[in-house]
Image (spheres, grey):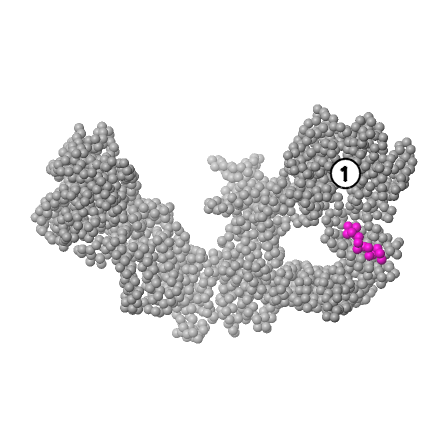
Amino acid sequence: MQYSYFTAKCNFDQDTKPHRLNLDVGDTVIILKETTHWYYGYRQKAKETRGIFPKSYVHLCEYNIVNGEYCIQRTDIVEEITKVLLEWGGIAKSYFLSTNPNFQKIRRKINELNNNRSALISGNLPLDEMRKVKLQATAQIDTGNKLLGLDMVVRDESGDILDTNAICTTELYENHVNAVQRIEKANRLSSDRDLGRGHNKYSHNILLHVNAFVCKFMEDSDLLFTLFDGDTHKPISENYVVKWSRTGIARDIDQFDNNRVLFTDLSRNDLSISKMYLVCYAIRIGSMEVKDSMESKRTSMSIANSVLTAASRKHSQLSVNSNGSGGSTSEYLMRRPFGVACKDLTPIISKPEDFRGNLDLPFIMCEKDTLDGTLRKLIANKDIDKIESKMAVTFEVLRGDIKQIKEDFPRLVHTNVPVARKMGFPEVILPGDVRNDLYLTICSGEFARIAKTSEKNVEVTVCVANEQGQLVPGVMSIGAGHAPIDEYKSVVYYHDDKPKWQETFKIHVPIEEFKQCHLRFTLKHRSSNEQKDRSEKPFGLAYVRLMQANGTTIPQGQHILAVYKIDHKRHDKTVANSYMELPATTAELQGTKPSIPGLSLLPKDQLTICVNLCSTKLTQSVSLLGLLHWSAHKETLEQSLNALSLVPGEEVVKFLQDILDALFNILVENDQPEKYDQLVFMSIIHLIETVSDLKYQHFLTVLDVYINESFSATLAYTKLMDVLMRNIRDAITPSEKSADGIELEESAAVRRLYKTTRYLHYVMKFVIRSRVLYAAMNCNTDYVDFATRLQELLKMFIDMIGCPSNLLKSEGALLKNLHIIATDLMEVFDQVHLSISIVEILEKFPKRRLTQSKMGCIKDFVETKLFSSPKCRAILLPVFCKHIKDHLESNDEIAECINIMNNILRLLYRSDVGPTHNDVRDIMIILLRQVMKAAHALDRDTGVVGQFIAIMLGILQRMDAQHYKYFVNDLHQQGELKDFIIEILLVFEELVSPHQKAVFPRDWMDMIMHQNTVILGALQQLSMVITDYFLCPVFDKQIWSNFFQCSIAFLVQSPLQLNDFNDNKRQIVFARYRDIRKDTAKEIRKMWFQLGKHKPKFVPQLVEPILEMSMIPETELRRETIPIFFDMMQCEYYSSRLELESYGDTKHNNAHHKGNFSEFKTAMIEKLDILIGAGKGDAEYKELFQKIMLEYCAAHNTLNVDGTSFVAMVTKLMDKLLEYRCIIQDESKENRMACTFSLLQFYSEVDLKEMYIRYVYKLCALHMEFENYTEAAFTLKLHTELLRWNDTELSPQLRSYRHSNCRTHRELKEALYFEIMDNFDKGMQWECAIDMCKVLAQQYEEEIYDYIKLAELLKRMAQFYEKILKEMRHTSEYFRVCFYGRGFPRMLQNRVYIFRGKEYERHSDFCSRLLVQHPQAELMQTLEAPGEDITHGDGQYIQVNKVEPIMDAAFAKFNDKIISNEIVKYFTSNNVQKFQFSRPFRDSTNGGSMDDVRHLWLERTELITQFPLPGILRWFPVVDTHTFKISPLERAVEIMKDTNKDIRQLVIVHQSDESLHINPLSMKLNGIVDPAVMGGFAKYEEAFLTDEYLEQHPDDKDLIEELKELIAMQIPLLSIAIRLHRQKAPDSLRALQDHLECCFSDMQQHVESRYGRKSCDLKIERDSVIMRRTNSFLPALFDSSNNRLSETSMGSSDSGLSKSTFLPRPPTNSIKSTLASLSFNTRPLGHSPSTKGNKHKDKTPAKRRSMKKDRDTLSLPVANCQWYTPPLTTITSTPEKEINSSINSLASASNSSLSGPKTPDPRVLTEELTPKRPLRSEKDKERRLSRPASIATPTATIKAFADTRSLSESSNRNSVETTDSTSEEDIRPPPLPAKTRDSTDFSSLTHSLDWNPNGYAMLNVLSNNTTTTTTTSSSSTTIMTKTSSITNSTYEYLEATNFSLPGILDASKPRPPTPPPKPMRHSKHIP
């Protein structure tokens, strides 16, 4: 069935209807069936889907079927453009996405290519445009490929892609070089490229198009355009005539829209003259005076847009021609001067691309001046551009002869475009160019007045007349574009007796009539009166003959003609030629006054003309005529022969054939051979010399045609040979010399011989042609005589070369022409004898004589027909090769040698030169090794290397198996076979090696693939040679090793990796060259298994190359090569342990088996790392390797265990390496480090020290890149563990590139120790640095006794100790990170890690950083374990929470010791491997209250990491997890331990540093001794220290006792702390101190009475405490009276957030950040966040009223203001963002109050409070005591407080918020009234706030018995204001004055919104 192929031209989409086939524009569809309006078929890209679609939606296309696929039938260039656009499109997209700067360039090229493709497909282009667009498209493709780095396309001159398989290697290389030059030229000339064919450089043309003429016209005009020489002021070319009408358009219908002319025959000299003008003479045709009419108007109409009206056509027909003879005789018309326009063309010709479009020619009118005078005036006018009247023309320079231009530009130069020739011969006269043009210029005239009183208005009429005086019609032309005319009429100048016309026109008289014709000039006066003018008759006559009496034409130059008066009455008109009896010129008059009837001389009148003859048939030379007519003038023959050398070349070439006929007639027929033969011979030489001149070189073809067709002198050969031998004999005869042996001068014979040998080839052509003609006439009867004579002549050539006289020039000329002579002699002489003679001539030359000429002769001979003959080539080629070899060895004439070898190889590749087998053998034997050596020795940067390589490849390409066999035998006999094999393998390896500079550029795809094809063929031949000669009996390891190295390097080279290519390139390579990798792999495999018993010698060596080969992504190739590895395992396993035994010897003695393959294993591991890291291999290779190797191992009895283990290990390594390669480029540094660490572990397990150390430094470099100095130090320690403290020499595996100068273990280990110490110092791990110092110190002190180094080391150690105590360093925070989902890298999937955070990195910052590294991941909001949908899904989920490090048990020694906290703090968060986090929950199963502290449990999870942190990574995986529950009692014990520990630490800190603020101590003590809201440890007593509890929980007895002990131990600690507080407290805190002591006294009495009295090891030394009382104060924020929270009832330390041992902030840390972490809450005291557990509580109004009543009765002491903070949020609610927003506003308010210089001193606003707190109601007290402690997880808000652990236990509220109830009735309390400045009593202020830069200014806000009361109608509550504080150099506090919540001022406003409920245990948020 015949299918049709269509393309969719519109989208078709009707999914809703059945059986429809959807189409997109451009889809190709195959039609199976059709109806009237529908087609049924399928899309080519989706053949399975078929349907119907409308016929109108598709377009029928012509198609071809290629490989079973339908393809649109397009031309090759369109198909190429299509593929290129598809390929470029993808690259352009990637360029756009990566913002590549070349995107815009390639985008423009794509658009241009698309336009070119559209133009080519359209079919509307003419041939020249089609060719031009094609060349433009190919140029765009080539330059675009170069820009994109794609492969270069090799093309021919027409732009077609070359068939690279049809040309030889050297020709392919030359085409690549030409392509590079073509692309470079296209890039340079991208704006205007000359894309045509090679043009004739001697011929230039100018195409002129006249578009418009802007001027005021009144009459019709003739516009005469010509090219004008400004230097000589003469026209260069013929005129071009445009007939212009008064309407502004052409008068001639033929010129309508076709006003163009081609000025031709211009030479380079013409275009290079200093000033060339385009001149236009405007000649008005009409009456003497201009007649104005209504029709006169100014026109600027374009010819192309004008239409001839009927009236204008009629006027055009009636108007006179230029000569006035074409119209009616009754018309009163004459030619009058109108004006002149000109334009300087010099800049336009030099750069035509800058002058596109119209050119304006300024035009001026003549007025009363002549046309020539007006032109001179216009040229001299400097303001020429200001002239308004202008002509518009288009100008274009075209190169080439007229024939070529018409072929290349048929659209521009069509058949009816007139041609204006140069008025002279072109630079090169073409043989067929027959011209007989006489250019006549009427220069001027002088006419005397006779009867007239005024000057004449003279009109000259010129005509051509024959001997009878009759007019010859149609032989005159005013210019191109004008029809021939009968007579020419000059311009009439008004009243001018001496007119200067300077008018030139052409006379073209046929050759046969030229001798009989003459020119007749008639002079007439034209009257300005029409009536008088009609009666005017000619008054004068003049004439001149065209031929002179001696047969020559009228001479060039000026001629002054005599003017004769016409007496019309006496003149006999019947005798028309009567005037020819009179003298024509004034020179002929000789003083006489001749006259005839009717004609008399006017002695004062004369007419001056100028003649310029351009004729190829007529001559003006008398000497030439004498030679041509020699038989009639034999007496002057010698004179004529001698005069021939004086005849101009133009005359010689015109009469070339006639002169040659005459000369050979003289040679054969003369009676005096001794006299004339030499003269004739030299005349022939002169003639050949003239024709060989550059100007007449085209006439060489005329000479060749003459020799082959017209020459007929059958006897000339004998005389020519005689004269030739005589000249040689005369020249080689020793000449006269001076006394000192020097020749006096060059003899005439030597000069004659040189002249003869220069043109000897043409002399021999005449000889041979004469002999052929003679032999044809005489049946070749005397051939023996001729051959003998010719042999004698050749012998004389040999003698001439061997002559000792100085004939170098003649010898050089002979060498130059010898190839032409030999080619011609083949026709008449035996070819073999001729070849022998040529060899003798070449061999006769001495070695260093005429080297260049000799090589040039050889080069020319290669291209001759003689060399194409196999018999002759067998004689010539060895000699040629020998000469080439000699020059290559001497490094002389390299370029010429390369050209000769290129030509020889190109000729041998042809199919029409006969058998070439022996020729290739000769080249191979003589030149191959020399070419290889030359290529190897030369520098790659020289361009000659590529040519040598191409020649070498060309020779190898032609060599077959027989050649190799012959060559190898020859080399083997000479003992050079091994050297050759090594040389050629080395050359091959360097050609394909990526480490060497490429010989051929990377984009020379065809050249490189051709090279690879040739190399593969050579390797296949060489493999057989190596097997035959170097395997046995003598095995040569070097050659075999070189072969494997070369073959594998060849196989793995990038140009052969087809998988890396795009589809287009892959298809091209497959189609032209196929995949040659398989053949190469088979060859390597074959050679490996041929090694036999020698295999073990190559096992470690060949592992890497064969491994690299096996990783090529080609399945079949991999299957061929992977089994080699198993064979290598066997080889090493069965190899002998004894060095003297060979591989085969172990077969007889199994005990000598090595029994392992450790070397192979080591090499395999090392090389895998290198190759996979370099991008080789993939997961498929790993699986295939594992499968094949396991099959082999399983089938082997001995290696099944070890082999299987090895395969598993290698597979694991490949897995890790592939993962490393994939992730090492990842932006996530953690992933990169983890992969590096994974490999580090692997190499540690397999004990590969070199690889281990390599990855140690890779990991170290990664850490240094990200400034992980601590981890970098730990990483470097791994290297030191491999080193010993001795002076053993370092093995290569243990060396470090960082310390390359270290030679011994001790040196390197010492250097690494110092580098590690530096990194520990930068990472602030001074304890670790000290440990390193101790090791070094021991070596210096006890081993090498270097006390100088020891002293320096101890100084540095002392600095480290000092830094521990004095420098600030952060405490690292740790985070548990879980990676869930298959979307993560394999090493992270569903794994748990502990991460060490950065300095001061909070939870939110860490999460953000983690999400940046994993942008596709989603942060989980709960700590619940995810389901399988997440863990087994393709997504990425991250779960993050903070964990607390658990200090190692080894550091329990610090317990109960009074040491600095800075010492202990390090060990709490460093060198830790165990971490924990807790989640609180309430156990309400027993029915107890949710607020009961007895039901608050913790779920604690402990995690153990693989390695301690910090370590060589910032994270390690969790290897063990243990989750358990903490009972409320255990939790209470923990809290009490922590509280006691904090008190103890505070005391120690304040004792050690007296400058610390007392503020934290005050807060801590106040929170413990006066717990206020939280109840302190009283709640624990109430909950656990009861008999009831002990009965219910008898197992907790020990814990209860421990709790009692802790409570009792707290009293002595508090006692010491309060005493210390008293010593340091300023006067302003005296009231607080009294309050603390009062409360402590009650507490002490209570505890000691119940639990006994305890003692403490801490002591207070009063003398050591120096108090500072001068106006120092602590901000109210930190006043102990302010913090009425119970320290013993605060949140647990197991919150999951950072827990740090309480320390005051270092001096450099700003307290501004401390306050910034707090959030101030001005809610009423009863306002607390609700929880889900509150929902079940009673919401009755009675409860609300009772709570409100309790609050109304509440009053607080005036010790200080109270601070409130918002409720705590969960971990995942990003509290930092919320908190910072409120703190920022506070900070800005505070700063504004401090920054202004005019701000008045702040005042602390206080309320009037009762001096003592009233007793609580029993109900309130019961509620407070029963309220459980808070289990809220603290956030970053807590960090500002001194003790995070104690603060984290607030019950259902934040760290320092105090409320009395958690019931729902407290959610919406009435707002407290705001305190304003107006209501403040300032009488209590006793101090003013002063600025003291050296201390603290303070406000005494503790005035005794001063209160302020604020009352509202609904309640009476208390509001505190914050005390302002000022900073000094140590601390910086924020100031906030009168802080209150808006809305509190007005009780009528609505209540504040309810805060969000507190999350419960089972909520989705992380608790």
Residue 132 is left or right of residue 1800, and the answer is right
Residue placed most toward the observer, 1571 or 1379 = 1571
- Please determine whether, in this image, residue 527 is positioned above or below residue 1038: above
Q: Residue 1927 placed where, x, y %?
A: 25, 43
Q: Is residue 1250 visible?
A: no
Q: Quadrant of residue 1764?
A: top left
Structural crowding at the residue carrying mark 1, measured as other residues with C-alpha within 10 Å and reported as few (<14), some (14–19) or many (≥20): some
Q: Is residue 640 visible?
A: yes
Give the farthest residue toward the top. Answer: 294
Q: Quadrant of residue 1404?
A: top left
Residue placed most toward the observer, 1178 or 1864 = 1864
For label 1, the SS is strand
Identify which residue is drawn at 68% across, 31% down.
215
Q: Residue 523 placed where, x, y %?
A: 83, 35
Q: Residue 1289 placed where, x, y %?
A: 37, 69
Q: Please report the bounds of the magenta region as a residue range.
A: 638-652
Q: Which residue is mark 1?
A: 503
Identify which residue is drawn at 77% across, 37% down.
500
Q: Main secondary structure of the magenta part?
A: helix
Identify which residue is drawn at 46% across, 46% down.
98
Q: Residue 1148 placed where, x, y %?
A: 43, 75
Which amino acid, mark 1?
Glu
Give the farthest residue toward the left. Answer: 1649
Identify which residue is drawn at 23% across, 46% down.
1894
Q: Which quarter of the rendered picture does the N terminus lie within?
A: top right
Residue 606 is left or right of residue 1131, and the answer is right
Answer whether residue 300 is magenta in the image: no
